[in-house]
Amino acid sequence: METNQHDQRQEPVMLKRGSPEFESMYLAHFNALHRYAFTFVGDDVIAEEMVHQMFWRMLEMRGGVKVHTSLRAYLYRSVYNECMNYLKHQKVKQAYQARATNSENNQFEDAAAQLQYKELEKKVKQAINTLPEQCRTIFQLSRFENLKYLEIAKQLGLSVKTVETQMSRALKKLRVQLTDYLPIILWVLFNSF
């Protein structure tokens, strides 16, 4: 009469620290398990560490390990799990490092932007202060107090045409004085919105 494979039961293998079975199992399977682990982690030293870690976990189990399936299948599954846990940990670690690096880069960019803005602000103030008094006053009323040319003309007792001419001169002089800072001005304008 034929026996079905499922009907054949293997006796469970008991592996304990210090037992001759454990030591012989370690010696018999280490090299094959090392090669298997290498296929996942791609590094000789880490593969060796995964196999050692798997055996170490077995040793740490109180009362030993009772293997109900084939010993070989149990060992390969255990090494596979060690490797997958290691790879998951590496993935999380890399994601954290990427976020930390990105955060540092953003902080650096923010600090650089602040420095550039302060430098630009200083140069603009210096350039405005070099304008003739009436020209400077008209520019400041227009740009900083948001007054229209007609309002400026009434406030200063000038014609609207004089205000327009003075604004035109102010803008022309500022453009010439701030030519070297045009890239920074553009950068601030485009990154502030």
Image (spheres, grey):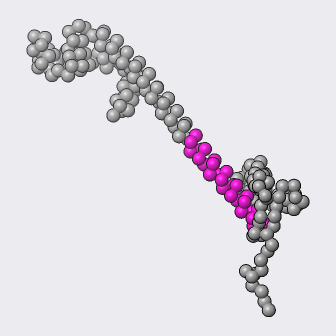
Q: Is residue 100 above or below residue 130?
A: below
Q: Residue at x 24, y 19 (%)?
A: 144
171 relative position to 36: left or right = left
Q: Is residue 100 above or below residue 111?
A: below
In this view of the protein, which residue sits in the foreground, 57 or 121?
57
In this view of the protein, which residue sits in the foreground, 89 or 138?
89
Rendering quarter of residue 158: top left
| Residue 87 falls within the magenta-colored stretch | yes
Q: Quadrant for the C terminus, please.
A: top left
Q: Position of residue 190 (x, y in %)?
A: 36, 33
Determine if residue 118 is in view.
Answer: yes
| Residue 107 falls within the magenta-colored stretch | no
Rendering quarter of residue 150: top left
108 relative position to 65: left or right = left
Determine if residue 51 is in view.
Answer: no
Q: Residue at x 56, y 45 (%)?
A: 95
143 relative position to 83: left or right = left
Q: Residue furthest front?
A: 63
Q: Position of residue 143 (x, y in %)?
A: 23, 20
Q: Quadrant for the N terminus, please.
A: bottom right
Q: Residue at x 71, y 63 (%)?
A: 77
Q: Position of residue 138 (x, y in %)?
A: 20, 14
Looking at the rendering, the stretch of residues picked out in magenta corresponds to 71-97
Rendering quarter of residue 119: top left
Q: Residue at x 70, y 59 (%)?
A: 80
> Chief secondary structure of the magenta span?
helix
81 relative position to 148: left or right = right
